[in-house]
Image: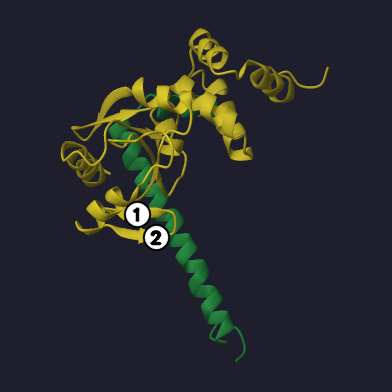
């Protein structure tokens, strides 16, 4: 991971990507007990992005010219398959801009906040996203007030109430 | 150690330590997946250990 993050940081320094933040299972691991995953989800902003169609080709070309290998929806960067995701809505854009700074083996990086990870998982809504939300709740890894604020601002309060009703409160 | 206690202990590790665990878990998953593929290929070619040819 150290070498992968060094490559990503170099790509950022070279102006190929703007801000970035780790999401997905690796991002969740910043807050929770580690859970197996084989890929790294990276939310990136792209310089010159007008919000319509975002072209990821410069990222792929940059990395491929430095040894990266395309593999399905990933590009393998120094052993880690990386999936580049551009923020698709206001929630994801905020998640990248408000990400938490940290480091791995001394290499600086940024991770999406616990509350934004939960909100994105709620919005995505697959079974594995629900499982992850439950892990955040059960391990006490979220600030409830901050989460409430994020959910309200992004129109996810009703969805959260449905999630609570279904998974956290049990049958009435 | 109970599962919640173990989870709390793991969650309290540094990000660097957690990433090292993730990498071990990833390597294990990939090894298991590769072994599955090897078994499948061997089965398809009739070359399965202990099975009649």
A21 left or right of A131 in image: left
B37 left or right of A113 in image: right
Residue at (51, 17) in percent of width and height: A140
* Chain B drawing hue: green
In the displayed image of the protein, which residue is found farthest to the top? Answer: A145
Q: Which residue is mark 2?
A: A71
Q: Which residue is mark 1?
A: A75
Q: Is residue B2 visible?
A: no
Q: Are marks 2 and 1 in contact (CB under 8 Å)?
A: yes
- Label 1 sits on a secondary structure element that is strand
- Please give the chain letter of the residue carrying mark 1: A
Crowding at dot 1, Cα within 10 Å, few <14 / some 14-19 / many 20+, comes out as many
Q: Are marks 2 and 1 on the same chain?
A: yes
| Circle number at residue A97 | none
Q: Nearer the viewer, residue A160 or B37?
A: A160
Q: Nearer the viewer, residue B9 or A140?
A: A140
Q: Nearer the viewer, residue B23 or A93?
A: A93
Q: Position of residue B23 (x, y in %)?
A: 35, 47
- Please give the chain letter of the residue carrying mark 2: A
- Label 2 sits on a secondary structure element that is strand
Residue at (52, 29) in percent of width and height: A120
Q: Nearer the viewer, residue B37 or A108?
A: A108
Crowding at dot 2, Cα within 10 Å, few <14 / some 14-19 / many 20+, comes out as few
In the displayed image of the protein, which residue is found farthest to the bottom? Answer: B53
| Chain that appears yellow | A
Seen in the picture, residue B48 relative to B37 is either above or below; the reply is below
Q: Position of residue A42 (x, y in %)?
A: 37, 39
User: Residue A107 sits in which quadrant?
Assistant: top left
A11 left or right of A156 in image: left
Q: Position of residue A64 (x, y in %)?
A: 25, 58
């Amino acid at each position: 991971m150290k070498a992968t993050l060094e490559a990503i940081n170099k790509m950022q320094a070279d102006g190929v990507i703007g801000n970035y933040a780790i999401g997905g299972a690796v991002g969740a691991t910043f807050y929770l007990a580690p859970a197996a995953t084989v890929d790294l989800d990276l939310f990136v902003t792209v310089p010159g992005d007008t919000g319509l169609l975002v072209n990821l080709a410069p990222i792929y070309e940059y990395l491929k010219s430095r040894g990266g290998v395309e593999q399905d929806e990933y590009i393998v960067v120094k052993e880690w398959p990386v999936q580049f995701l551009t923020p698709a809505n206001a929630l994801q854009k905020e998640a990248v801009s408000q990400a938490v700074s940290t480091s791995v083996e001394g290499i600086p990086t940024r991770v999406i906040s616990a509350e934004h990870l939960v909100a994105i998982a709620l919005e995505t809504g697959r079974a594995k996203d629900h499982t992850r939300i439950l892990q955040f709740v059960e391990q006490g890894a979220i600030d409830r007030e901050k989460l409430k604020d994020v959910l309200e601002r992004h129109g996810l309060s009703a969805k959260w109430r449905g999630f609570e009703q279904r998974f956290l409160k049990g049958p009435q | 150690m109970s599962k919640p206690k173990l989870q709390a202990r793991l969650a309290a590790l540094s990000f660097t330590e957690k990433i090292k665990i993730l990498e071990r878990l990833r390597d294990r998953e990939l090894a298991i997946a590769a072994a599955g593929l090897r078994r499948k290929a061997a089965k398809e070619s009739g070359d399965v250990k202990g099975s009649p040819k």
